[in-house]
Amino acid sequence: MRPAALGSFTGVRIALLGSGLLVNLIGFSVYPYLAILLRQRMDLSMDQVGVVLGLTAFVQFAGGAPGAVLAEHLGLRRSLLLAMALQTLGSLGLLAGEVWPPVTVLALMIRSAATALYSPAVRAYTVHGADPDEQPRLVSASYATGNAGIALGPVVGALFINDPGVMFAAAATLHAALTIGHALLPQESRGHTRAVEPLHRALSGLAVLPFTVTALTIYLHLYFYQYLASYAEGRVPTVFYGSAMMGYSLLLVVLQPLLAGRVEQMRYTQAMTIGFGGLAIGMSAFAGGHELTIAAGIVALGVGNSILFLKNVLEALAGTPRSAAVVFGHQRLAEGVGALLSGVVGGVVYQAFETAGHLPGLWLAVAAQCVLLPILVVLVHRRLRHPAPAPVGPR
């Protein structure tokens, strides 16, 4: 790396990158195992678990847009402090949930809201005051360290899944330390703040098809992220599962840059065919229920999602006159909609197959959705864009 590039990474920015890694590591040490935790603590059925997962994921994903607006109003340093204080409170709530189980749900909501505020604020602070040629390096570094935390989190969670109290106590301690660390950040300059778009214009210029396909992608993807841990429990070792989840995140880190040029040149329908085809193959493989099929399924999902996540963003950017920031807000909202649907619908579907004693069939049902739903979305979109002409009757 050139000396000028190294100069972009000041002490404050390196601290923020490390904070992003730790926050994601703590969050994703819990997220893949939430279904197990909720069932153990509260004896919920999977359809009830799905509602909780859907709501918390919706707050975390879709809350990014209002979180960004709040960060603009409060200031980045204040927003980071508030987010970390909420993260600490949420971790303490998860710890208290061992004694008062319903507190677990409230704690999850608090941590989701904290993440919705923290994510846009930390990325904005990381690039604050940077020259335009420095920003790509800083943004990519922010995503890379965040993805490293996402990759390591499931492995850490696997080590503590049978003793979550220790993990939540450690999480509360780390979050409290990070809160103190963020209090030491210098106050950012507010001299060049931009006007915030009024709320009533938030969805104007929405790229409808990329929005819908993003929501569908997340809806299908989160069957894997929210329910595979419960399915894999007792079928494969927990440490294997955690390592496989880490492998999935690292696979995205490697594949997305490698495939970026080809994905950009693909037609949207071609990218959808390959991407959802990868999801269908991966979900079908999970039905096997052992190490080899789960590992193969995760690789197939990694390929499919690498294409879909990137192509959806590129199509959204190309399909609207709105700014890139607004487009990313739209995509974040689409992710929230898909996450909510995956929790509510996915929990009911899981419960139905579990009650029937045919749980491997869940993954075949999801695979069928990976094939049929994208076709339905494209057909409906084309029909709405080009409605059939009204029949001409006799005059």
Image: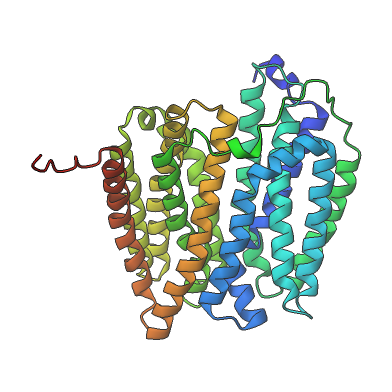
Residue 236 in the image, given as x and y percentages of width and height: 48, 72
Residue 222 in the image, given as x and y percentages of width and height: 49, 59
Q: How many marks?
A: 0
Identify which residue is drawn at 36% across, 64% down.
Answer: 366
Residue 279 in the image, given as x and y percentages of width and height: 36, 54
Most foreground residue, 349 or 15: 349
Identify which residue is drawn at 51% across, 54% down.
Answer: 337
Identify which residue is drawn at 50% across, 67% down.
Answer: 344
Image side of residue 360 versus residue 215, left or right: left
Image side of residue 117 versus residue 371, left or right: right
Most foreground residue, 236 or 39: 39
Residue 60 in the image, given as x and y percentages of width and height: 64, 53
When the figure is inspected, residue 287 is found, relative to residue 334, above or below; the finding is below
Give the position of the C terminus as an image quadrant. top left
Identify which residue is drawn at 45% across, 78% down.
Answer: 351
Q: Is residue 26 visible?
A: no
Q: Is residue 362 visible?
A: yes
Most foreground residue, 77 or 382: 382
Give the position of the N terminus as an image quadrant. top right
Quadrant assignment, res 86: bottom right
When the figure is inspected, residue 284 is found, relative to residue 388, above or below; the finding is below
When the figure is inspected, residue 218 is found, relative to residue 386, above or below; the finding is below
Quadrant assignment, res 332: top right
When the figure is inspected, residue 29 is found, relative to residue 307, above or below; the finding is below
Q: Extreme left residue here?
A: 394
